[in-house]
Amino acid sequence: MLAQATSIMLVKRALRGVFTLWLAVTLVFLALRTIPGDAADALMGQQMSAEGVALLRRQMGLDQPLLIQYFAFMGDIVRGDLGLSLALGKPVSELILQVAPFTATVVIGALLIGTVIGVPLGMIAGRRQNTWIDAVARLVSLTGLVIPGFVIGILLMIPFAVWLGWFPVVGGGNADDLTSLLYFAILPALAGGLGMAAYLTRLTRSVVLDLIREDFVRTARAKGVSERAIFYRHILRNALVPIVTFLGLYAIVMIGDSIAIEIVFSRPGFGRLIMGGIAQRDYTLLQSVLLVYVLTAIVINFAVDLLYSWIDPRIRLTA
Amino acid sequence: MSAADIHSPSIPVQSRSRRALRAALGNPLALIGAIGCGLLVLLACFGPWLAPYNPLDQSILARFAPASASHWLGADGYGRDTLSRILYASRASLVISIASVVAGVVIGVAIGIVSAYRGGIIDAIVSELANMLLAFPTVVVGILVLVALGPGAQNVVIALALSFIPRFIRLARAETLAVKERTFVEAARVTGVTDRQIMVRHILPNVIGTAIVSGALWTATALRAEATLSFLGLGVQLPYPSWGNMISDGMPYIFSNPELVVYPCLAIVFAVVFFNILGDALRDYFDPHTDQH
């Protein structure tokens, strides 16, 4: 019964994810077709003869009706064929795989930094409400959480990379060498992670304050359970649900923020692919990268749903 | 008194403003936020008169000029006065951010109220679509829209409004669903008030307060997104200044003239922090239940 309810919920969520992806593919397709001048124009520049552009357009299937183009596009995507980059002539999937490690280290690093700073700070602030630690945590989280990641990145880059030279200013390191990959990712990951830490501190603090007042905490205390055990077994465990929800939501925000952060540090990541795609009107590249973003967001949402029922068995019944 | 005049009880205006004043004085952070935002709005309004130079005027003699009495914050690679550019940019950033939030509130609240009040299949579709749109990162939606429509201030407003609309649809739906069942709405319906009048006179006043408070908080997010998009070259186009494009313009000189990047960064930091503090204080004041601690 229980397992059945859970699997029905998961199937529902998965269907919703597929539908969202379809919607996203369609929106991206339509959005890129509204741009004046099609991909053949962009590819050929102004030098090409009208016949040449027409030939190219036929080769690319751009002379077909929109609906046919749409189905062809959907078919390619379903088969996992992202096409050739218009500007670079290489398979888009290859380009994406090439830069993925650089973007992944920044996003994952930022999420780790944000969690490692934010959760303990919020816990401490919540347990010691109205002390100076609490006041500092509140002020930092109130001011830190809205500063754009790329601005934090620049404000870190100037003292630590430009003046002190501790970190590189430009580039993403060597993709085959984990140490170099991580070293180049430290400042960009901090740029994303500090804003997130501010958010997470605030959330954790307020969750802890709510939980401290719960009946089961009072009962545990009345039974003589030590404060330590109350904190780890009752409060921490219950605080995990909102924290995991937040991590899922913020991972999606971070994917968006990483674009500008990567540009600041001139990293060879998704951000550069997108901005290059826009500058060179490389629509196949652009649509694929945007789809990877949306797909990641959907997968994260789904993973959060799965995690819920694992952390808190009660959610299985109510969903 | 006709049935249409039945409103939910509200606090008399005078006591409310006095209460707000007392709350502001008792909370120094809120006061800082309010004063900071007020100053920013004044600077945005009167910036062109305060700015010592035309922000587009180039001067070969002033190239990379350090801070001095004639150029308080120095000048950029074209000899354009940094302070004047920051002042002009504040107008663009504030107008774009506030306009996009207002558009998001107006359109989102309208759709949310009608959808929740009517209910049925349309409501189900609207709320499902809103939830789906929320799954896309704001910056990615912005890039998609700006690639399709082309860069520029107006299109940034459209792009940001599009990502705010689903949030306000959600908010207005939730409030409407709660208010819809209350006695005064039922009373109005029984006495023959039309659905449109019920939505405008009875439901809207109950929804709009929460929407405005939440809008104040979203202004900080809008500023942040506007800065990001214009840094990426998709917002206000050079040579016209925006904080974001001033930063990308100055990045090549980060070793020799880091101040070209630092000043617009600080402008962004102050703006988003002030608006966030103000929004936060407004929420605490109007809706003390959300965060009592």
Image (tube, coloured by chain):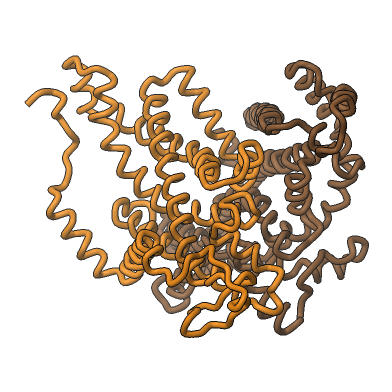
Chain colours: A brown, B orange
Examine the rendered structure and indicate whether residue B173 appears above or below residue B150.
Answer: above
Residue B248 sits in quarter: bottom right
Q: Quick one: which residue is furthest to the left in this view?
A: B1
Give the quarter of the figure containing the N terminus of chain A. top right
**Residue A314 in picture, x, y percent from top left:** 56, 41
Give the quarter of the figure containing the C terminus of chain A. top right
Residue depicted at x 74% and y 17%: A67
**Residue B46 in picture, x, y percent from top left:** 35, 63
Residue depicted at x 67% and y 57%: A260
Q: Nearer the viewer, residue A78 or B66?
A: B66
Q: Nearer the viewer, residue A87 or B238?
A: B238
Would you say A140 lies left or right of B207 here? Answer: right
Residue depicted at x 49% and y 70%: A140
**Residue B221 in picture, x, y percent from top left:** 50, 53
Q: Nearer the viewer, residue A52 or B103?
A: A52
Would you say B136 lies left or right of B224 here? Answer: right
Q: Is residue A143 visible?
A: no
**Residue B283 in picture, x, y percent from top left:** 35, 54
Residue depicted at x 69% and y 39%: A294
Residue A317 sits in quarter: top right
What is the tally of numbered marks visible in this picture? 0
Would you say A90 lies left or right of B60 here? Answer: right
Q: Quick one: which residue is furthest to the front in this view?
A: B60
Q: Nearer the viewer, residue A252 or A59?
A: A59
Q: Is residue A290 visible?
A: yes
